[in-house]
Image (spheres, rainbow, N blue to C red):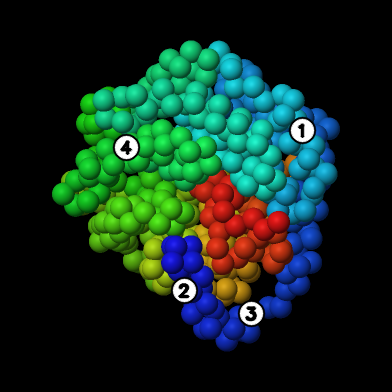
Amino acid sequence: MSRVGRRGVVAGLLALAAPARAARRRREDWRGLAGEVRAEMAWAWGEYRRLAWGKDEIRPVSGGASTFPLKGRHLGLSLIEALDTLWAMGLDDAFRDGVAWVRANADWDVDGEVSVFETSIRVVGGLLSAHHACGDPMLLAKARDLADRLLPAFATPTGMPCRYVNLHTGAVRDTATNPAEVGGYLPEWGTLSRLTGDPRYADAARRAVRACFERRSRLDLLAVRIDALTGAWLDRRATIGSYADSFYEYLWDGWQLFGDIEWKVMHDICVNAIMRRQADRRGGRLWFADVDFETGAVLNTREDELAAFFGGLLAQGGRHADGAAYAQSWAAVQARLGVLPEEWDYAAGVPTQLTNALRPELADAAFNLWLLDRDERWRHLAADHFRAMRRWNRAAHGYTDLADVTTKRQADHCPGYWWSEQMKYYWLIFSDTPRFDYRRNYLSTEGNVLLGFRH
Ligand code: IFL
């Protein structure tokens, strides 16, 4: 039985316990709420279509646009990130319109430099999930062409990729990298190898992960910066937050998606060490400290919002109670501030970075927990996340980040992941759509569905 199949069994067992708990909570019309999510997506897509068509990221307050991941030139990032969400929602005309744009305009032969990791999870992943949705070989060909242009970054002595590559020349830059940008490839690149029969993508992804994992400390912890050229650590701080997060997520995912036991072994070693050395239970809440990766000494008690994904990962790896507790820790912050700040000091109980980058991690955790136990409390948590976002982040032309969570002052940027992640998590958790297999599926760190669409 594949790992995904096993998740179905676990979900069935956990679901038996769910109805009693669910009955104590307020009643919601989940399908109605799903309709509201879909309406917001259709409206935001309409604004993007009208004001920023083919641009990377819309500025939802002013109606302008910004570029990412290439400086000064648009690649259609948001459009590509949105595709599988549109399809999952049955917004088929919009999906076809977007695919037609890709066919006519997406061209990766650009003399400019991109982040290898961001381009892979967002653009290669977005094209692969759109391909999974509709089967159009053009989408796979575009994904492969782009991955071929990222591959030169992996030609280092360690196998860990440099952070940036020029899409036209293949010139690489910046060997001072981090676990997330080293280990964040296998789901997309393994899928690419499976679909094309070309093993180079999966091989490069595997080699990079192993190189980083093999350099873990005697406590089985990874630090947050590493040199791709020499393999030397450049920092001592172990964190589950930014620059490390996707490494742990993709160890589990390599096992879940491909059933390869090597990834589960690595995942268990890393997560056991994190639980032993970084878990900090205080005031009835579970948090994770940043610690010295060799001594385990606590360095600080500040957590990135990005770390909120870890609740879902803990539950997927079999630590359901811990995963639920961690998601509830973040839910409590959301209840207190309305929306989550970029960074929170759990010892002091104060936000330490006041911005809100319109991030999806708490909705991601709620979705993964709900897939496992079908407990209505996760739907309620996702509903709170959605309603808070609609209240505070909605602007004239779409959804925007916030400059300050205490005043709710809006900034003017809609990140590409908004289209791929939280809107999809809300939709899938509320809608019970027949287009998605709720027992056998796989969503990447970017929310791209690489397994589980039903036609
Ligand atoms: O791009 C997103 C992805 O989930 C990730 N890191 C951060 C983004 C969303 O906050 O791996």
> Alpha-carbon neighbours of circle 3 within 10 Å: few (<14), some, or many (≥20)?
few
Q: Name the residue under label 1.
A: 100
- Residue placed at 66% from the left, 33% from the top? 138
- Residue placed at 71% from the left, 30% from the top? 102
Q: Classify mark 2: helix, strand or loop.
A: helix
Give the camera-side residue of 241 and 49.
49
Q: Marks 2 and 4, Cα distance to the nearest angstrom?
A: 31 Å
| Amino acid type, residue under disc 3 in the picture | Arg
Q: Marks 3 and 1, Cα distance to the nearest angstrom?
A: 44 Å
Q: Which of marks 3 and 4 is in front?
A: 4
Give the camera-side residue of 221 and 26.
221
Q: Mark 4 points at which residue?
A: 207
Q: Mark 2 points at which residue?
A: 10
- Residue placed at 56% from the left, 49% from the top? 450
> Alpha-carbon neighbours of circle 1 within 10 Å: few (<14), some, or many (≥20)?
few
Q: Nearer the viewer, mark 3 or mark 1?
A: 1
- Residue placed at 37% from the left, 51% from the top? 251
| Contact check, label 2 and label 3, Cβ < 8 Å | no
Instruction: Name the N-terminal-most of marks 4 and 1.
Output: 1
Q: Classify mark 3: helix, strand or loop.
A: loop
Instruction: Name the N-terminal-most of marks 2 and 4.
Output: 2
| Circle number at residue 25 | 3
Name of the residue lying farthest toward the bottom: 20
Instruction: Name the N-terminal-most of marks 1 and 2.
Output: 2
Q: Marks 3 and 4, Cα distance to the nearest angstrom?
A: 47 Å
